[in-house]
Image (cartoon, grey):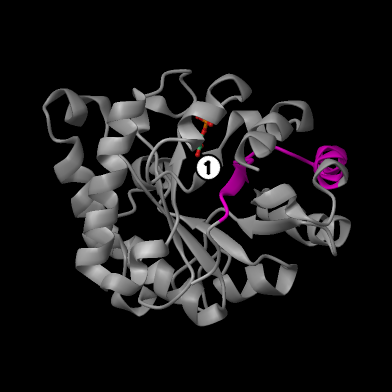
Amino acid sequence: MKQSVKMIVGNWKMNGVSAALAQAEAIRDAVGTTGQGCRVVLCPPATLIDRMQSALAGSGVAVGGQDCHEKAAGAFTGSVSAEMLVDAGATVVILGHSERRSAFGETDADISAKVEAAIAAGLEPIVCVGETLQQREAGDAIAVVSGQVAGSLPSCLAERDFAVAYEPVWAIGTGLTPTLDQIAEVHAAVRAAIVAKLGDGARTAPILYGGSVKPENARDILATPEVGGALVGGASLKAEDFMPIVNAAA
Ligand code: PEP
């Protein structure tokens, strides 16, 4: 298992054409080659991975994908395999994002299969979990998230580098965030579920928080127990928003 430094991951989602590489370069220049005491990863659309990797090579910023197919190759029109992400220059992949779970109907079993494919290709998966507002209001947040961890993490992850991202669905892109106590409570439950599934060796796997992380709230969230970093959507698109979050983790 890698690291005890925090991990800050930018998820650009379906945003960015060539011009957006200037933001990645600005982030690269600000981070330098040291990573500033934390790990920084940018996950652009698949079409930009290759060029972003060239722009960031040798810097403290790594490149990741946002999804992969569970099969290595074949008749799956429009899909990208884990090996293709590696070939383009990715070292990390986000899997099971709530937008994949809701808009594309991905189940825990689907995500587990994708994690296996990512590990087989040599990628470090970041597996996303999180409850909806309805589930939280029904008092089911811990049970939902623990169930997603149990179902989405295959046993091949034991002794491998991976991360879990706790992203409450109702906090993504809304400006809303849970209280720090709520984040701490869910992160403790995620840790317990990870260890129950994969054993003590998984005690150091980072658990990232995601959902409306911004320069204004990053420092407090990153100082919360069991928060090993952040998965950042909207605020990762511009260097001026992303760098204060990176600096809060350093
Ligand atoms: C995300 O999409 O993973 C995310 C956390 O988005 P935002 O930071 O915009 O809420």
Whole-percent x and y of residue 49? 73, 57
- Does residue 142 appear in the picture of this structure? yes
Image side of residue 137 versus residue 194, left or right: left
User: Which structural element holds mark 1?
Assistant: strand
Measuring from the top left, give residue 63's x and y in whole percent: 70, 58
Is residue 71 visible in the rendered structure shown here?
no
Kindly identify the residue that appears in the image at 41 percent across and 75 percent down.
116
- Taking the magenta stretch, the answer to whether it contains residue 12 is yes
Bounds of the magenta segment: 5-28
Q: Pointer 1: residues within 10 angstroms few (<14), some, or many (20+)?
A: many
Quadrant where the C terminus lies? top right
> Circle 1 sits on which residue?
231
Front residue (pair 93, 34): 34
Tag 1: residue type? Leu
Residue 59 rendering spot, x and y as whole percentages: 83, 58
Residue 132 sits inside the magenta stretch: no
Seen at 61% across and 29% down, the residue is 234
Q: Is residue 71 above or below residue 49?
A: below
Ligand 1 lies under 8 Å from the Cβ of mark 1:
yes
- 247 or 63, which is in the foreground? 247
Toward which corner of the image does residue 194 lie, by quadrant? Answer: bottom left
Q: Is residue 133 left or right of residue 97?
A: left
Please name whichever residue, 88 or 184, is drawn nearer the observer in this view of the structure: 184
| Image side of residue 179 versus residue 78, left or right | left
